[in-house]
Image (cartoon, rainbow, N blue to C red):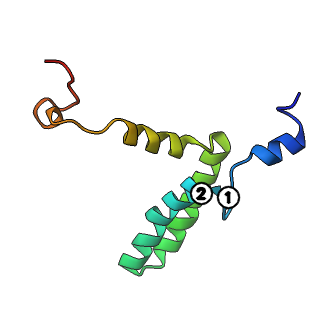
């Protein structure tokens, strides 16, 4: 019952920036703002609209996906065997 209560949903929702969770907003800034600065093209604004809609849909599906991906990368660092074997090898 508590999972459907409006007050519970409002208090457990992640903080948002421009309608996206912070992790998605930072991802959008990297994907959209940097090409706009580098290319100085009006097409970058159209690209930003497409990326915003895609990230908005993705955040409605799962708003913690980017954070989980970043935690997974940070938790499992690359090993020296990655160059040799093409993947992590922890065996002898």
Residue 39, picture quadrant: bottom left
The extreme left residue here reads: 84
Label 2, on which residue?
22
Left or right: 6 as drawn, with respect to 46: right
* Residue depicted at 47% across the width and 73% down the height: 43
Q: CA distance from mark 1 to mark 2?
A: 6 Å
Label 1, on which residue?
16
- Crowdedness near tag 1: few (<14), some (14–19) or many (≥20) residues, C-alpha within 10 Å: few
Left or right: 50 as drawn, with respect to 72: right
* Residue depicted at 57% across the width and 60% down the height: 25
- Crowdedness near tag 2: few (<14), some (14–19) or many (≥20) residues, C-alpha within 10 Å: some
Where is residue 2? Give x, y as percent.
86, 31
Residue nearest the viewer, comparing 90 with 82:
90
Mark positioned earlier in the residue sequence (1 or 2): 1
Looking at the image, do the residues carrying marks 1 and 2 touch, with CB atoms under 8 Å apart? yes
Left or right: 38 as drawn, with respect to 8: left
* Residue depicted at 42% across the width and 37% down the height: 72
Residue 64 drawn above or below residue 34: above
Residue 36 drawn above or below residue 59: below
Where is residue 26? Give x, y as percent.
52, 61
Kindly identify which numbered label has been placed on residue 24.
none
SS for callout 2 = helix
Image quarter hosting the C terminus: top left
């Amino acid at each position: 019952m508590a999972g459907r209560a409006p007050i519970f949903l409002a208090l457990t929702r992640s903080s948002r920036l421009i309608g996206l969770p912070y992790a998605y907003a930072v991802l959008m800034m990297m994907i959209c703002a940097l090409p706009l600065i580098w290319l100085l093209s009006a097409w970058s604004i159209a690209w930003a609209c497409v990326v915003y809609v895609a990230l908005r849909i993705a955040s409605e599906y799962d708003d913690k996906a980017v954070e989980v991906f970043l935690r997974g990368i940070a938790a499992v660092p690359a090993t020296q065997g990655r160059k040799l074997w093409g993947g992590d090898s922890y065996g002898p």
